[in-house]
Image: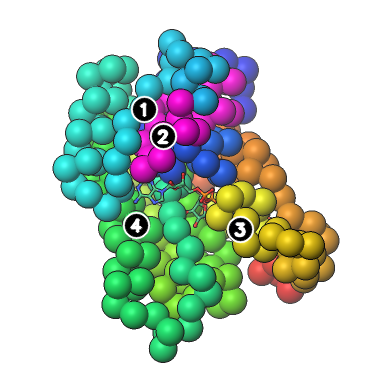
Amino acid sequence: MTDGEFVGKTVFITGAASGIGYAQAAAFLEHGASVFGFDLNEEGLRRLQEDCPERMVFRLGSVGSPDDVKQAVELAIATFGRIDILCNTAGILDGFAKTLETDEALWDRIMDTNVKGMYLTTNAVLPHMLRQGAGVLVNMASIAGLVGGGGGAAYTASKHAVIGYTKQVDLDYCREGIRANAIAPGAIETPMNAADFAGAGEMAAQVAEETPAGRWAQPDEVAKLTLYLAGRAADYIHGAVIPIDGGWIAK
Ligand code: NAI
């Protein structure tokens, strides 16, 4: 990443109130970008805004709601005039439910957030990027998008869909200045995995043991990869899936 390359850029981040999305927002703000955060949850967004009131704006809403997404993107454009980078980070886990334990409501909730939410947000932001002739998408997949065992049936299906969607969006628009890639994190210590750290943290210890690197990663490690993928140095990286998993899928 070149010094100052994000100054004057606007980044739209879904799921910015917590975990990886929060770390992405903080990292882009630290590097001089303006950030528009979109999430169901206000607390983390407020904290980011308090730290950087002049360059951080947010709106509450769901990525699964076309109206919420449309209004958020309109506000981002009205506020900053453009969106240079879209981080589709919002996502939810399915409690590792097998398919026979997955009722339709759970299936729909996971798909609406992880897949449809990404499609709705991308379709709201992309026309602005195409008008600019430039834009970068960083979509949050998972090791569950590449192998089984990283989630339940719905989550694993949703993250495989995220990877397919990312490749197709990149192929369809790469000649118009758009670049889309996906990140496939392994075990990242965020509120999503709070249950693993509950009590004596036996589950978290087991996950670390099963990870070749022998540890969990922190969300800022994923944020640093995001900045790399969003930056000029990654200009020839298209439709790729970059694991950040401590060696999990190499096993
Ligand atoms: P998190 O639970 O800490 O943060 C997720 C954020 O998304 C929350 O602020 C939540 O309010 C927001 N969100 C959920 N549903 C939403 C909706 N319908 N509309 C708007 N915002 C919504 O989780 P974490 O760990 O930061 O996860 C971020 C992304 O990274 C997710 O897509 C997740 O699947 C992915 N991921 C996480 C891994 C991990 O180990 N933490 C591993 C692999 C992928």
Quadrant in which residue 12 is drawn? top left
Q: Are marks 2 and 1 in contact (CB under 8 Å)?
A: yes
Q: Amino acid at mark 1?
A: Phe
Q: Amino acid at mark 3?
A: Asn
Q: Badge 1: few (under 14), some or many (20 or more) residues near its Cα, within 10 Å?
A: many
**Pointer 4 residue Cβ closer than 8 Å to ligand 1:** yes
Mark 1 or mark 4: which comes first in sequence? 1
Q: Which residue is mark 2?
A: 42
Q: Residue at x 28, y 17 (%)?
A: 79
Quadrant in which residue 223 is drawn? top right
Helix, strand or loop status at disc 3? helix
Helix, strand or loop status at disc 1? strand
Compared to residue 6, the image places residue 203 above or below, namely: below
Mark 2 or mark 4: which comes first in sequence? 2
Q: Which residue is mark 3?
A: 193
Helix, strand or loop status at disc 2? loop
Is residue 58 visible to us here? yes
